[in-house]
Amino acid sequence: MSEFDAWGPLAPLIGEWEGDEGIDVAFNNEQGRIVETPFREKTSMKPFGPVDNGTQSLYGLDYRTAAWRGDEDNPFHTEVGYWLWDGADGVVMRCFMVPRGSTVLAGGETAADSRKYTMKADCGSEIFGILSNPFLARNARTSSYEVDITVHEDGSWSYDETTRIEHARSSDVVVHTDRNRLRPAGS
C-alpha cells in the first residue's frame, strides 16, 4: 500500500509539472474573434489531508498553475485552488479561482484507481457551481465548465477542458477550450 493511497485518483498528480503542448482556443478581445494560442505551463500539486467535515474525510492537492504564450515573462493565465478526493463517496473535485474574478467548484464520481475521470460545474448550481464578479456576469458569463483528466502509462497526465461563455461580443455561446499534457518538472 502506497503512502498516497488516501488520495485515490489524485495520487498520480502529486508533484511539480511542466507542459509545452498547450493549446488555448478562446475569444480574443483585441481581434474580436476566436483564436488558437499555443502555451506552456507549470503546475504544482502538493498533498494535504485528511480534512474532516464531521463524518466526511477529504484528501487534497493544494495547486497553483501558470501558463505563458511563447517566451512571455508574465503568464496570461493563472489559477490557485484545490483538487479534492472524497473516498467514501467516490467523488473527485476541483475548486479554483482565476484572478479575473471567477471561481469554480467542479466535481464528478469516479473510482479510487481511475486513470480517467471528468469533473463538471454549471452556473447557478449550488453543487458544483460557478461564480463570477459583476463585470464578468454582464459581459462574459461562464455558463458551464467541464474537464477530462487522463493519467498516462508514462507517468504524465493531460487535461482537456471546455468552458462555455455567454459573451456580450458574440451572438453565439463561446466555446473556450484548453488542453495540455504535463510531465514531471525537469524531465
Image (cartoon, rainbow, N blue to C red):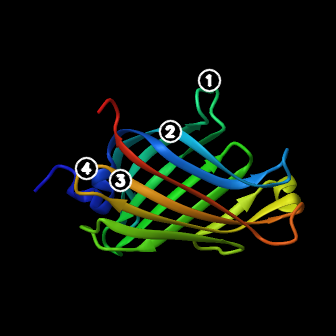
Name the residue tied to disc 3: 157
- Cα separation, mark 2 vs mark 1, equals 12 Å
- Residue type at tag 4: Gly
**Residue 6: image x %, image y %?**
25, 58
Height in image: 184 above or below 123?
above
Local crowd at mark 3 within 10 Å, few (<14), some, or many (≥20)?
A: many
The reply, left or right, for residue 82 in relation to residue 13 is right
Circles 1 and 4, Cβ within 8 Å, touching? The answer is: no
- Residue type at tag 3: Trp
For residue 86, the mark is none
Q: Nearer the viewer, residue 128 or 69?
A: 69
Residue shown at 32% from the left, 45% from the top:
14
Say whether disc 3 or disc 1 marks the residue closer to the N-terminus.
1
Q: Nearer the viewer, residue 146 or 35?
A: 35
Residue shown at 28% from the left, 62% from the top:
8
Q: Kindly state the secondary structure of the residue where label 4 is placed.
A: loop
Q: Quadrant of the C terminus?
A: top left
- Cα separation, mark 2 vs mark 3, equals 13 Å
Name the residue tied to disc 2: 41
- Residue type at tag 1: Asp
Name the residue tied to disc 4: 155
Name the residue tied to disc 1: 73
Q: Kindly state the secondary structure of the residue where label 2 is placed.
A: strand
